[in-house]
Structure formats: C-alpha cells, structure tokens
Image: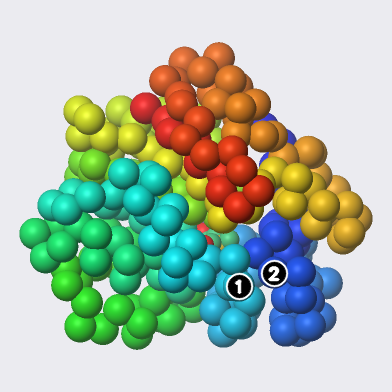
Amino acid sequence: MGWNQYKIATYFYLNKSLSEIVPTKVIIFADLMSDFDFFDALAPHWDASETESTPEKVAEMLQRMGVERGMSVLDLGTGTGVLLAEIARRVGPEGKIVAIDGSAGMLAIAREKVRGLLPAPEFLQLDFEQQSVEGRFDRVLLYCVYPHLHEPVATLRRLVSDNLTPSGSVMIAFPTDANFIDAIHAQRHADSDRCPTPGELAADLAEAGFKTRVLADEEHAYIVEVR
Ligand SMILES: C[S@@+](CC[C@H](N)C(=O)[O-])C[C@H]1O[C@@H](n2cnc3c(N)ncnc32)[C@H](O)[C@@H]1O
C-alpha cells in the first residue's frame, strides 16, 4: 500500500499546529529513529495536539464502529489511550479491553490516564506486526494507526484469522478524511503515496481477499470495516 514513508506527515493530520508543539529535532531526525523511539519522543506532546479526537468525536466514532455493552475490544496502537475511557463507558464493567502499543512513552501516559477505569484495560507493550496477540475480540481497532503498518495485508490476515470472534471485525478509522491527510502531506512535502479514500481502501482489501465495508466516508469520519 506504500504508506510507510509518511511517518512525519502523519503527525500533522491530527493537528496542523503540531509543528509548533513538537521540538524541531524530533521532526528532523524522525527518519533516523525507529518507529517507537519516534513515538516515545512525541508522547509528551501527543494529547495537546489531539484536537481532532475530541471526546464527542471519539464517542461518535465508537458508536459507528459498533462498540457495545459487554464486548471485548482490542485497541491496537492505543497511543496515549485517547479511545479508552469511551470504550470502557460503552462496553461497561462486563466488557474487556486490551490496549497495545510499541511505544513505552505513549503507554506510560495511557496507563496514568485510565487509573480507576472499569473495566481496567490490560496494557501490552509489543509490536503487533511482529508478535502475535492472544485472544479473540468483537472489535479490533486501528484508529489513526493503519498508515504505520509495514505489512498491512499480512497483519490484517493474521488479525482476522487469529483475533476476531465469529461476528467480530477490524475497524480502520480516522477522525478525518483522506483529503485532509493528503493536504497535510502536500503542506509538508512528505514523500508519500496518496492516501486512499475509504472506498479505495475497501476495494484494495477486498481484492486481497477480505470482506470489507465502508462505514464512514465523510470530512470528519473515515471508517472501513474488515473481516
Ligand atoms: C498516530 S499514533 C495514534 C495513537 C492513538 N490511536 C491516537 O489516535 O491517538 C500511532 C500509534 O500506533 C503505535 N504503533 C504503530 N505501529 C505499531 C505496531 N506495529 N505495534 C505497536 N504499536 C504500533 C505507535 O507507537 C503510536 O503510538
């Protein structure tokens, strides 16, 4: 899918003013850092930059992704845990949440944020493209994460076969549209392919053998369901 080179640009689709917050050296040296070192460096600045994922927006997105009471939810690339409080509210105490990230810095903030939350998310620090995840889930969320995958099709195949309940699905989602991401790339002169629209992504993945459905294709909502 060729999205891997836009590591830097990705940080600007959430908030155009992030460059004012993140130290310049983090941006300049991003290409020399491992993915997770890069996110460790961004972690302290992340929540201040997360203006698209307001609590209202997160609530709307999770509702549209069908996160409901009693469900088990795997939040892949949870970052600072922007989704976790609302996932917990929706699944209720009988639900289950597993939150994974490869960045220790991001996870440290997430852990602090959800202190006392019920159900308590189980946090795991691992690279979910390299290591398998145990358990089956009703929803596997890739929220603002899909562009970072190095082997998206292989990773999705493993998630679909090993980590979904029979009626479960993977959700590839953003609180923006593809045009917004492209505009940010152009602004930053990022070396990246054009971000596919939800329809294009669903078609590409269907061609790769997945069952796909576009659940949102709007200015402020991008959701593709994959099974
Ligand atoms: C753009 S941030 C999004 C974080 C959060 N979902 C949000 O919307 O605020 C992407 C996150 O995914 C994590 N990530 C990317 N690829 C990963 C992988 N293969 N394994 C574990 N974490 C990964 C990064 O460390 C980072 O915290």
The percent position of residue 121, horizontal first and vertical second, equals 24, 67
**Which amino acid, mark 2?**
Asn
**Residue pointed to by mark 1:** 51
Q: Secondary structure at mark 1?
A: loop
Foreground residue, 6 or 216?
216
Q: Secondary structure at mark 2?
A: loop
Asked if the residue at label 1 sits under 8 Å from ligand 1, the reply is no
CA gap between label 1 and label 2 equals 6 Å
Earlier-in-chain disc, 1 versus 2? 2
Quarter of the N terminus within the rendering: top right
Residue 87 lies left or right of residue 176; in this view the side is: left
Q: Which mark is residue 15?
A: 2
Q: Is residue 85 above or below residue 183?
A: below
**Which amino acid, mark 1?**
Thr
User: Which residue is pictured at 36% across the width and 82% down the height?
Assistant: 113
The percent position of residue 88, horizontal first and vertical second, equals 24, 65
Residue 117 lies left or right of residue 187; in this view the side is: left
CB contact under 8 Å: marks 1 and 2: yes
Using the rendered image of the protein, determine whether residue 118 is visible from the camera's viewpoint. Answer: yes
Foreground residue, 71 or 147?
71
The percent position of residue 186, horizontal first and vertical second, equals 88, 52
